Structures are given as C-alpha cells and as structure tokens.
Amino acid sequence: MPKPTILLALDPHSAAFCAAIKRQLQEFPVAESCLIQTYTLTWDGQAFGFSGELDRFADTSFDLAQTHSKQAYVSKIRTQLSEATGEIQTALIELLKTASQSKEAIAAKRQGVEISSSHQVYLMLSVSNQFAKGVVFDIVRLIRWLFSNYFVDIPYSLEALLLLPGLFSQAKTADYGAAYAFLKELDHKMTSGVVIKAAQKVPPFDNCWLMDGRIGGLRDNLPSYADALAGFLTVEPETNGLLIGVQKVRGKIPAYSSFGYGELFFAGETTINRLSAALAADIIMEQFLPKAEFTPEAIRKCLLDAKGFILSEDFSNAFLGLERDNGKPVWQDFNPRLEMHAGQAKEYGMELQRAYRQFENKELLSYKRTLENCCKQLQATLTAFLDRTINRYADATPRGLHEAARLLNILTFLYLELQTDAIGDQSQNLVTELRAAEAFLDSRLQVTIDKEATQKLLNQIVSLKLRQQQLQDALAERKSEEQLQELQTTQKQLETAIAEYRQALNAEIEQARQIRFMAIALGLLSQHSQSDYQFNGRSLGKDREQIALAFATEFTFQELYGDLEERIETFERDFIYHKLQELGTSALYLNHYEGKLLDHLLSEYNPLN
C-alpha cells in the first residue's frame, strides 16, 4: 500500500541526488511513484524557503572542496533560522499537506488506488555540510511539533538519509572530522531526545540510513544510486532492511541502518593524518607551550606588566576623547543669552524656565547620546589595545600563551592588593582604576569610607609575605632547621592573620554593645527628646547599632569610649545589676539580639554569681 512520502534535501549535493531520484521515479509505475514528493530547502543568505525546482539549487559536481568557501558559520545559520521560524512553519504546513492532497494523489484515488493514512518524511543531507548540520535539528523539531499540533490524527515516520564523505570528491580530513562530530551529536540526541514542547522529548528521527562510497562516488555512479534509492522509497519498511524493535544494545536503540555498507571509513592515510595531528598537538603543548612559572619574580613581572598597561600612553590617551567630540567638550553648561530689562523680572523668569526646558529636551539629550557614542568608541579602542598587548605578550616567550592568560587574570583580579610584594609598591589593574573612579565620585558626593582597619591588616599580610619570601630564599641557599620552623610559623601566621583580625574586631564590637547597654542603664547615655543619645552633652546619634560600631572602630570615639568605661567602673556591681533590671522592665524598644545581650549582662552582674 503506497504511502504519502516527502523527500526533503537540506544541501545542494542532496538536492542534486534528489533530482536524479525524481527523474528515476518517472520510470516506475504511477501507483508506486505518484505519492513521492521531492523538495529542497533554500537559503539566499537572508531568507529560508522550500522549492520543488531541485535542478535550480543542485550542485552536480559532488565536490566538497568547492563548497568549503561557500559555507557560513553554523551559529549564524541557526540564528537566522530561529528568526524565520514563523515563515518556515507556514511553508512546512503547506508542504506537508501536498503529500496527500497533490494532483497525483487525487488522481490515484480516483483510479481506485488504496493509499495508506500513514506519512513518510525523509530528510537527506551530507553529514559534512555545515549548512545542513546547522538547520537539520531545528527542522526536525519543527516537523515533530507540527505533527503533534496540526496533524495529530496522521501517523507518520521521520527518517534521515545521511550521505557520508566517501560519496563525494576531494573528501579531506576536515570533512571526516565534521562528519564524525555530527554523528556524535546525532547519537547523543537519539538517546537523550530533543525537546518538542514543554517537557516532551522524542528522538529526532525514527530511523537513520547511512550511505557510504564503497561502490563509488556519486558523480560517477549517480544513475545507479538514484535507481537504488527510488526502489528503496517505494517498498514497505518491513522489506527494505530496516531494523525493527526498540530493544537497547549497550544503552543504544537500533536507530541506524545501512544502505550499502554504511560505514564511516577512514583510510590508512587518513588515520595517519589524524594521529599525526594529535601527536603534533601533544608535542606543541609539552615542548613549545610549557606552563608559566609561578615564582615570585614571575608574578612580580606580571604585576609590573599590568601596571605598565594601565600607565601606558595608549591607555591614558584613549580616555582623552571620552568627553570630547571632534575636539569640543561634550558637556556644556546651560548659558541662555537673555537680557533682563527693568520691570520685566517675571517675564525674564518665565523665559528662563522655557529656555531651560528646551535645554533639557534638546541640548542635554544630545550631550547624553554623544557621550554614549564616545563610550562605545572608547571601549573599542581599549579592546583593540588589549588585543595587541595580549598578542605581543603571547609571542614574546615559549610560555607566552599561559603568561598571557595570567596577565588577563591580573588585569581583572578583584583583590590585587593581596598580590603586592612590598608595602610601598602600589599595583594597578583595571579594577583599581574602577575603584579610583568610584573614589573620585565619593569625594564629589562627600562620602567618607574608613579604611584604617583594612590598611593595617593589609600591612600585616604584606609584612608576613615578605618575611616568608626572605625565609624561602635563605633556605634555598642553606638549609636550617631553625629557619624551616620559622617559615612554617610565618605561613601559619599568614593564614590566620585575617581570621584573627575578624575575631578581634567582632570582640570590640561586642564589648562596645555591652558598654552601651550599661551606659544606657546607668543613665550615662541619656536619650534626647528627639531620640538622640547624648554623653557629656555630645550627641551620638539615634541608631544604637551605629553608636556601638563607632565606639569599636572610629578613632574620634576612642577618647569618649575610654571616659565611658571609667565612669562605669566607678559604680558598684549591685547598683549596675539593679539598673539593668530597671532597663529590662522599662525598655520595650529593644530588639531580639539586644534582649539576649541584656540577659547575658544580668547573668554576669547577678550578685549570686
């Protein structure tokens, strides 16, 4: 029983093969060939479509060398195909309808030919063709989606006819590599499936047919291949050699069948070329691209190179044009040219407001757009400068590639100060430049950030690192058990410096909170009518958390903090405990943590303890 069949070619070589099959089908009985429709996918670099004029888009040379220069990037193809999904969907709906509603099918029905309700769709492609590889899985998903939404009542089978590189002239190692990559991707998708809608996943093809060139290439044997494929399309699946069943073998479903030998055959010369390439890659990586040295001298050199990049004229000159357009400043002040006459102050004010609104809507908007363009130009200039620097860095030494990667890491390292080898040596990278710009804005906005504690910690870390380096150098010249022990001690000190600092800071903050509670309880810190806390007539602020933090960290509060401690020590412990109890019963504004802290103080000053 004949089935409505669509044979769709996805590349010019497949289109030439399908055109030969179409001519061969004309010699078959009408009852067998009338339901087989042949089409090709077209793409002019911008738009996709389907055409039945196969000869117009066919490449009968079957020469892979001629197609290499014409192939576009797979990513570009997939992007344009995704953007044209709506148009392709409409074209595919019309194409699938013709399978059972063509003139030939209608004529066959009138002649009494019994036609199967099941449809057969074949996608033919060259597995080394980049264009076909870029579109095949998107076309598959779209066909599956159409049958699950528009042609729900029609049973169908979607199969692939895969032309291996051996069928074509001048097949190179790259073609076999491309074919292998595609078959690996196909095999993965046959096992894991492709997403059709929501969480529904199905294999891309119900069956895959592999065709190789063991009996000869397509250019010299096209009539023979076309005759064989025409016969293949007109027989039942049960009699054409198809593997039947879904029993998995070693985790794989029997989805592949062969037409002919169906082998991806690597000749001896091809195998040697592939192995030679792998061996050459290993030699280059091991001998010509050794890993970068991680010595203090190498790291310091990289730090200096990063600083040199920031301080270079190319880097600084790139910013000169940030706020200038054709030599003129981008930003210009509002400067209306209006004259004020006696007795016209109101009119002058209204005219001034109108001029400012015009300035905001026109000139100021134009300044912002110009600045945006200047920023884009600056980014392009800096990117080009960075590319030149990295290329020069990579070519300078045998370890250049690895050192270039390390330079990039240094240029973008967030904590560059931890890489500094000397306290007075200020390293610079892109992040420090960003922070410098932020600091400039802070100064303009009158934002003050206390960095004293951070700087002390940094000095300690740098000092320990210097001592560590001195000990390592001394041990390299002459081993000493005493110096080795000192080195181990220094390393431990370096590892624990930050942790100890954090603990000390937390202890100071905790002590400040306790002092603040006792001060409030004893009345040393009085609350003003405006909710400000005061001590000795000095306003400390409203936020108790900020007051405690200031006592622990800010230098200006240290003297006040000492006076407060001395005042508290003059009271008896019983009196302090009594005042803390009063605070607990009257201070309903305490938060959860402050309540726990008050309980701790009550326990500490309890006379029974």
Image: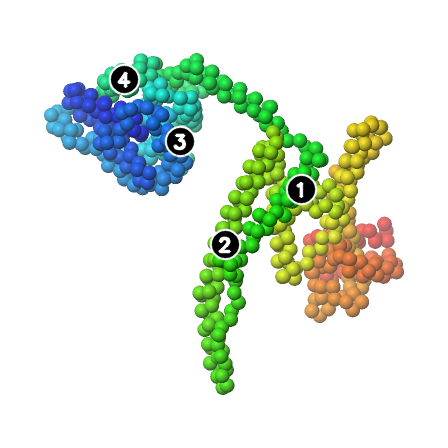
- Which three-letter amino acid code belongs to the residue tagged 1? Leu
Secondary structure at badge 2 equals: helix
Give the Cα separation between the discs numbered 2 and 1: 29 Å
- Mark 1 is surrounded, within 10 Å at the Cα level, by few (under 14), some (14 to 19) or many (20 or more) other residues, namely some
Query: Mark 2 = which residue?
Result: 374
Secondary structure at badge 4 equals: helix
452 or 103, nearer to the observer: 452
- Which three-letter amino acid code belongs to the residue tagged 3? Val
- Mark 2 is surrounded, within 10 Å at the Cα level, by few (under 14), some (14 to 19) or many (20 or more) other residues, namely some
Secondary structure at badge 1 equals: helix
Query: Mark 4 = which residue?
Result: 220
Residue at the extreme left of the image, as rendered: 111
Residue 173, image x and y in percent?
Answer: 42, 21
Circle 4 or circle 1, nearest the eye: 1
Asked whether residue 237 is in view, the answer is no
Query: Mark 1 = which residue?
Result: 304
Residue 548, image x and y in percent?
Answer: 74, 57
Give the Cα separation between the discs numbered 4 and 3: 37 Å
Secondary structure at badge 3 equals: strand
Circle 2 or circle 3, nearest the eye: 2
- Looking at marks 2 and 3 on the same chain, the residue that comes earlier in the sequence is marked by 3
- Which three-letter amino acid code belongs to the residue tagged 2? Cys
Asked which quadrant contains residue 217, the reply is top left
352 or 182, nearer to the observer: 352
- Which three-letter amino acid code belongs to the residue tagged 4? Asp
26 relative position to 415: left or right? left
Asked which quadrant contains residue 404, the reply is top right
Query: Mark 3 = which residue?
Result: 194
Residue 230, image x and y in percent?
Answer: 23, 20
